[in-house]
Amino acid sequence: DGFSTVRPAAPALSMTPISIIIPCYNGAATLARALRSCLAQPEAAQIIVVDDGSADSSADLAVRYGNLDPRVCLLRMPHNGGPARARNWGAMHAAHGLLAFLDADDEYLPGALAAASAFLAQNPQDVSVRLDVDYTDFPAELTGHPDFAMHAATLSNTVPSSLIIRRAAYAALGGFPMDDAFRRIGGEDGAFSWALRELFGNRRLTDAKRVRMHYHAGIHAERYFRVALGMQIPDPADVAEAFRFSRQFVETARAGIEQLRTASVTPKPS
């Protein structure tokens, strides 16, 4: 089962360094909280804030944190290009073999990256692991619905802040899809999750909540829950377009993986 859930591994004997990529567009109000949660993770060896053309003080805030802790660095996008482009640009500058993605309005809970690092160290056949998400301050009409927990688990399998992935697998999948359709209607994280599940599996640690998503008006997660719970009807044209681009991304990723599997590797000279 590509969406199978797993118990956490025992703590690894040695810490595995992780590069965290934080796409940020006008996120000054929450970025400090996200950065503090990263700095509290011993495995966070590199924290890349990708400023996506912000008009607020997000970049200045990242610089201030970088002056306090050299693990924090700032990349600037030339203009606002959307979170997928920002994540992919950040990943290109990652220095470590494990990548984590945290949205600027989310935060890690204590021990989050330790659990992910331990699992991947002890399961080398897995290319990624997901963390369980705590959906904080979401409207009671959503969280009180009898099916909320089921859909919350599904969403935890797709949101970027739940993902820790080996850099080689991320590159092989082509990173997050950057089609303009996804910028308009959302869903690039769902397409990436679909490809990851189909090609490698998409397992999630379920023993504890390790990422916190804070509610704010207009958050994409609220729209997902309202649609999933039957409280909102999506535009059928948007659904069809998202599915078409997602399937196209999955097939492109599948073809790329097959090329890698059949490629010959030149042996090192003896």
Image: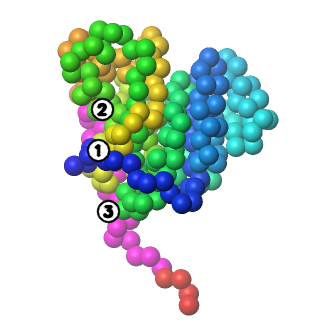
> Can you tell which of label 3 and label 2 is closer to the viewer?
2
Crowd band around label 1 with a 10 angstrom C-alpha radius: few (<14), some (14–19), many (20+): some
Residue 203 image offset from top left, x and y in percent: 33, 47
User: For numbered disc 2, what is the local secondary structure?
Assistant: helix
> Can you tell which of label 1 and label 3 is closer to the viewer?
1
The residue that mark 1 highlights is 5
Res 3 quadrant in image: top left
Above/below status of 11 relative to 86:
below
Crowd band around label 2 with a 10 angstrom C-alpha radius: few (<14), some (14–19), many (20+): some
Kindly identify the amino acid type of the residue bearing the numbered disc 2: Ala
| Residue drawn at the location 67% of the way across and 34% of the way down | 76
Q: Is residue 93 left or right of residue 267?
A: right
Quadrant where the C terminus sits is: bottom right
Kindly identify the amino acid type of the residue bearing the numbered disc 1: Thr
| Residue drawn at the location 59% of the way across and 41% of the way down | 41
How far is mark 1 from mark 3, CA to CA?
A: 26 Å
Whether residue 250 appears in magenta in the rendering, the answer is: yes
Whether residue 257 appears in magenta in the rendering, the answer is: yes
The residue that mark 3 highlights is 258
The label number, if any, that marks residue 153 in the structure image: 2
Residue 52 image offset from top left, x and y in percent: 60, 28
| Residue drawn at the location 33% of the way across and 70% of the way down | 262
Above/below status of 165 relative to 56:
below
The label number, if any, that marks residue 165 in the structure image: none
Residue 106 image offset from top left, x and y in percent: 51, 27
User: For numbered disc 1, what is the local secondary structure?
Assistant: strand
Disc on the earlier residue, 1 or 3? 1
Task: Point out the stretch of residues depicted in magenta.
Answer: 243-266
Q: Do residues under tags 2 and 1 come within 8 Å of each other at their CB atoms?
A: yes
